Amino acid sequence: MGRELSLMERLVRLPHAERARILEGIAPERRAGVARDWRWLARPSQLPPEGDWAVWLILAGRGFGKTRTGAEWVTAQAALHPGARFALVGPTAHDALAVMLEGESGLLVVAPDGMRPEWRATRREVRWPNGAMASLVSAVEPDSLRGPQFHFAWCDEIAAWPKPAEVWANLRMGLRLGERPRAVVTTTPRPLAFLRQLQAGDGVAVTRGSTFDNRANLPPAFLADVHAAYAGTALGRQELLGELLEDREGALWSRDGLDSCRVAEAPELRRVVVGVDPPAGPGGCGIVVAGLDAAGVAYVLADASLSAAPPETWARAVASARARFEADRVVVETNNGGDMVEATLRAVDLALPVKQVKASRGKSARAEPVSALYAAGRVRHVGMFAELEDEMCGLMLGGGYVGPGSSPDRADALVWALTDLMLGGRKAGPGVRVLGH
């Protein structure tokens, strides 16, 4: 048995095609058993992380295989720990029964021969042959967790619990049996403060994944339908890609608002500019391209920003964006660097049409009038710009930034571009621009 475990540990780290080749070389009498082993079937992201974690938080899109992962983990722990006590907590009693226990990937389905549990409906308990026992708990009733004690817990769709913080606090108080109590939390993320706090906690191992990670086991028609319906939307990033997005109270932009201004392509444009927020040191450089049509509507065309780059690299990225979209000018902030910023740009393209601008107010204050343009329906996004939009949703009314990274370089570059186009920049000339595709 020890030899097989060693083999499995090596096999699970290989691509499926390589596993299939190795499987053919395994003795026929062992081949069937290996092929049914969850460690063989699972993707690496569905296997428990290494290390001494207390909570394994799986934030993943729908169809990722979260339920199967949770059920297989519980089954493995029950086999390893005879007599152990488990809590199985779902959003409601019906969810716990229909999904975690009786569902297509639930405990009753994944259980191997010899370890098939018995469901005792009157006691709402699951019992394994070796004495391990699980209680099904509804998150609607936080007080039901005040008395029991557990070795392990599986919490499903915690982002859908009506009172997640209260239920979780009661559960953690009851996880006090054995040498190392552990909990697995499987959920599609939602913008909840509780979920953000949970993933940042000590002893929490986080696994992220998307619907498309499990494409081998999902119907092609389903994948095509959800891609067509939700690709390029904030809802798609949350429900399919499993990203933990946030809509913060007091933010200048919201996810729904940005989704509502999204279009597939830009019309004829009269002006195009590249907004640049250069780094003060080795940090990121914001580079955003936007254009204006004859009706006075602006279109965000590209985000060519760099996370970190030396001066020559970001200057070449600016020149490349300008050439690709045949921009009329490059609008660059020169508070940090002054004329050296323009000199850096001209070193890669002497003819670059550079306009220097200086900031007299903070980033949020400069962004407020641009946010008003969005609210008035005068700005469109040609596609999705995830990193840029994350920064935009982190700029707060009245000042402050609570988005990713230490500074909203991309959002600031957007503000410079749209300010030049729509808030005091040079008026549109007589020409017409048609963007190539």
Image: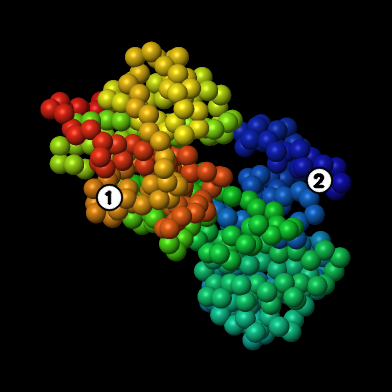
Q: Is residue 278 above or below residue 87?
A: above
- Render colour scheme: rainbow
Q: How many marks?
A: 2
Earlier-in-chain disc, 1 versus 2: 2
Q: Where residue 236 is drawn, which disc sits there? A: none
Q: Nearer the viewer, residue 219 or 424?
A: 424
Give the labeled residue for mark 1.
373
Q: Position of residue 228 (x, y in %)?
A: 34, 47
Label 1 and label 2: CA atoms lie apart by: 61 Å
Q: Residue at x 61, y 33 (%)?
A: 17
Q: Position of residue 106 (x, y in %)?
A: 60, 64
* Residue 432 left/right relative to 138: left
- Disc 1 crowd rating (10 Å Cα; few below 14, some 14-19, many 20+) is some
Q: Residue furthest bottom?
A: 122
Q: Is residue 271 visible?
A: yes
Q: Position of residue 186 (x, y in %)?
A: 60, 61
Q: Nearer the viewer, residue 27 or 181?
A: 181
Q: Residue at x 56, y 45 (%)?
A: 406
Disc 1 residue type?
A: Leu
Q: Where residue 5 is drawn, which disc sits there? A: 2
* Residue 18 left/right relative to 162: right
Q: Is residue 277 above or below residue 112?
A: above
- Give the SS element for disc 2: helix
Disc 2 residue type?
A: Leu
Q: Residue at x 16, y 29 (%)?
A: 429
Quarter of the image with the C terminus is top left
Q: Nearer the viewer, mark 1 or mark 2?
A: 1
Q: Is residue 178 above or below residue 2?
A: below
